[in-house]
Image (cartoon, rainbow, N blue to C red):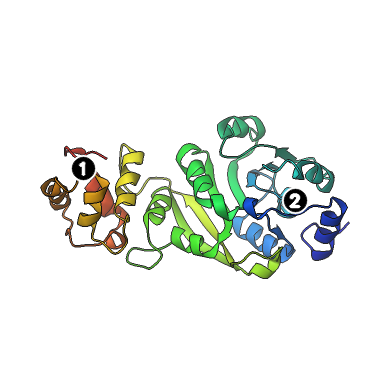
């Protein structure tokens, strides 16, 4: 039988189940096997690797993953797709479909139960555009056993993940992702390889978890609040943005200046010009201040 990731097979499956895609769930099915195989090649997936997938759709990517990985566990939120996946992937005994929102799932329990006999757990997914950031941050912050990510996403979002300071795409998301991983774009994906085609082009981003974090902070949530706060209004200086970030910030301008001075940061600089190391210095100064969010 033809692979799922082809135009003819995808049309056949959609027709058989009278399935209509939901834009609200970001449902765009891959119809180009070559694109998928290139991602799998770069991810160097073999029979010692367990793969988590999010939003398998009708199984286009899942099928190709199952051919090379030890096991694939895919989270699907749309109950209409559960019987479809049961049919399209019935030939494979190393796939488990979990009918659950991945953001609500007990990922640690899933890893322990499903991947006890693998050497590495990675994520490979065509992420729904509307929840790309929450899903990635959830995995990175709370599931340290996952070592690598190969995620297809909206081009604009993907460029932000790997952006450098002072570039147009650099922002608080860049800092958060690069705090946990080394991020790089590995593949461009045109909209024409999806059915139906999305409105934007996509890219595949590789995220490799750092063996040692680039900076030392003992409260990641506070650290990320400080980085996000520097981008409240992109054209404003960090000094002006922090006046809006902190409680009574307008009345505590000197306190803000003090933490920036202690961190050796010019208050006239904008958030996008600061490196992750400089934000770590601000975090260290903030801990010694009386400022509150």
Q: Residues within 10 Å of mark 2 (few under 14, many from 20)?
A: many
Pointers 2 and 1 in contact (C-beta within 8 Å): no
Residue 177, placed above or below residue 100: below
Q: Quadrant of residue 20?
A: bottom right
What quarter of the picture does the C terminus occupy?
top left
Q: Quadrant of residue 81?
A: top right
Residue at image mark 1: 286
Mark 2 to mark 1: distance in Å? 48 Å
Residue at (84% x, 45% y) in the render: 87
| Percent x, y of residue 11 | 83, 61
Secondary structure beneath disc 1? helix
On the rendered structure, is 34 left or right of 148?
right
| Percent x, y of residue 89 | 80, 46
On the rendered structure, is 160 left or right of 34?
left
What quarter of the picture does the N terminus occupy?
bottom right
Residue at image mark 2: 59
Secondary structure beneath disc 2? loop
| Percent x, y of residue 246 | 24, 44
Q: Residues within 10 Å of mark 1 (few under 14, many from 20)?
A: many
| Percent x, y of residue 126 | 63, 55
On the rendered structure, is 203 left or right of 245?
right
Residue at (19% x, 40% y) in the render: 291
Nearer-N-terminus badge (2/1):
2
Which is more toward the observer, 15 or 63? 15
Q: Quadrant of residue 77?
A: top right
Residue 262, placed above or below residue 189: above
């Amino acid at each position: 039988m033809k692979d799922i990731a082809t135009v003819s097979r995808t049309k056949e499956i959609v027709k058989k189940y009278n399935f209509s895609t939901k834009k609200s769930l970001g449902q765009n099915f891959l119809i180009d096997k070559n694109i998928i195989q290139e991602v799998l090649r770069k991810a160097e997936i073999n029979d010692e690797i367990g793969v988590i997938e999010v939003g398998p759709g009708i199984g286009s990517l899942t099928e190709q993953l199952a051919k090379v990985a030890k096991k694939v566990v895919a989270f699907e939120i749309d109950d209409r797709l559960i019987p479809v996946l049961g049919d399209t992937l019935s030939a494979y005994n190393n796939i488990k479909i979990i009918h659950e929102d991945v953001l609500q799932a007990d990922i640690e329990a899933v890893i322990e139960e499903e991947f006890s006999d693998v050497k590495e757990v990675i994520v490979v997914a065509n992420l729904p555009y509307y929840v790309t950031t929450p899903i990635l941050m959830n995995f990175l912050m709370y599931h340290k056993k996952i070592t690598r990510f190969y995620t297809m996403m909206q081009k604009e979002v993907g460029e932000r993940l790997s952006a450098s300071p002072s570039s147009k795409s650099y922002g608080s998301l860049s800092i958060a992702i690069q705090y946990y991983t080394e991020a790089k774009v590995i593949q461009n994906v045109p909209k024409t390889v999806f059915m139906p085609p999305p409105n934007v082009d996509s890219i595949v981003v590789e995220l490799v978890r750092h063996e040692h974090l680039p900076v030392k902070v003992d409260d990641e949530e506070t650290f990320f609040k400080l980085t996000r706060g520097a981008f409240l209004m992109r054209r404003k200086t960090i000094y002006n943005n922090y006046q809006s970030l902190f409680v009574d910030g307008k009345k505590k301008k000197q306190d803000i200046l003090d933490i920036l001075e202690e961190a050796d940061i010019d208050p006239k600089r904008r958030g996008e010009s600061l490196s992750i190391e400089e934000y770590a210095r601000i975090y260290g100064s903030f801990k010694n201040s009386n400022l509150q969010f």
